[in-house]
């Protein structure tokens, strides 16, 4: 009985150590047990970034990798937040550029606000 209990405890410890290492984390991610990872990104962040990339998972990974290169010690949640911030900045810049390009732009206060 004690041998069986020890075997279960050892197997659990080995599994816990495995999922904290690179290959184990990739397996956990592939299986879909992301919530077990410390620092995992919330589903809302994952869904938003995927939607912002028009459903292109390759683009999502490329954006995350670009952030990961710059901040290698960050958690997945931090990487997603920074990638989302970059998407929002790009959209904001595109919106600002679009209003100036079509001639409807001007200062933030609007035309005719100078005194």
Image (cartoon, grey):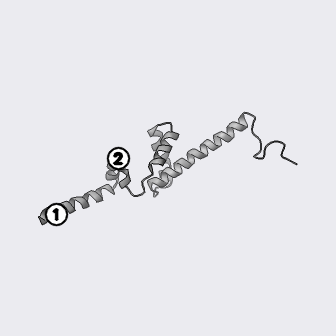
Local SS, label 1: helix
Residues under numbered marks 2 and 1 in contact, where contact means CB atoms less than 8 Å apart? no
Give the number of marks.
Answer: 2
Local SS, label 2: loop
Q: Position of residue 75 (x, y in %)?
A: 45, 56
Residue 5 is labelled as: 1
The image quarter in which residue 105 lies: top right
Q: Is residue 7 visible?
A: yes
Q: Residue at (12%, 64%) from the top-left corner?
A: 3
Residue on which disc 2 sits: 32
Q: Residue at (36%, 48%) from the top-left corner?
A: 29
Q: Position of residue 7 (x, y in %)?
A: 17, 61
Q: Position of residue 66 (x, y in %)?
A: 50, 47
**69 lies left or right of 19:** right
In terms of depth relative to the viewer, which is nearer, 21 or 41?
41
Q: Is residue 65 visible?
A: no
**39 lies left or right of 90:** left
In terms of depth relative to the viewer, which is nearer, 8 or 73?
8
Which of the image's four quarters has the N terminus?
Answer: bottom left
In terms of depth relative to the viewer, which is nearer, 14 or 37?
37
Please rate how many residues cluster around mark 1, counting C-alpha atoms within 10 Å: few if below 14, some from 14 to 19, many from 20. few
Q: Position of residue 81 (x, y in %)?
A: 51, 51
The image quarter in which residue 61 lies: top left
Nearest to N terminus: mark 2 or mark 1: 1
Q: Residue at (48%, 52%) from the top-left corner?
A: 79
């Amino acid at each position: 009985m004690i041998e069986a209990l020890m075997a279960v405890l050892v197997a659990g410890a080995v599994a816990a150590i495995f999922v904290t290492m690179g290959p184990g984390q990739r397996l956990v991610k592939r299986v879909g047990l992301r919530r077990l990872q410390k620092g995992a990104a919330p589903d809302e962040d994952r869904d938003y970034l995927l939607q912002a990339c028009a459903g292109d998972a390759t683009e999502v990974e490329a954006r995350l990798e670009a952030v990961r290169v710059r901040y290698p010690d960050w958690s997945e949640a931090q990487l997603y937040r920074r990638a989302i911030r970059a998407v929002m900045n790009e959209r904001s810049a595109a919106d600002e550029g679009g209003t100036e390009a079509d001639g409807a732009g001007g200062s933030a206060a609007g035309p005719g606000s100078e005194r």
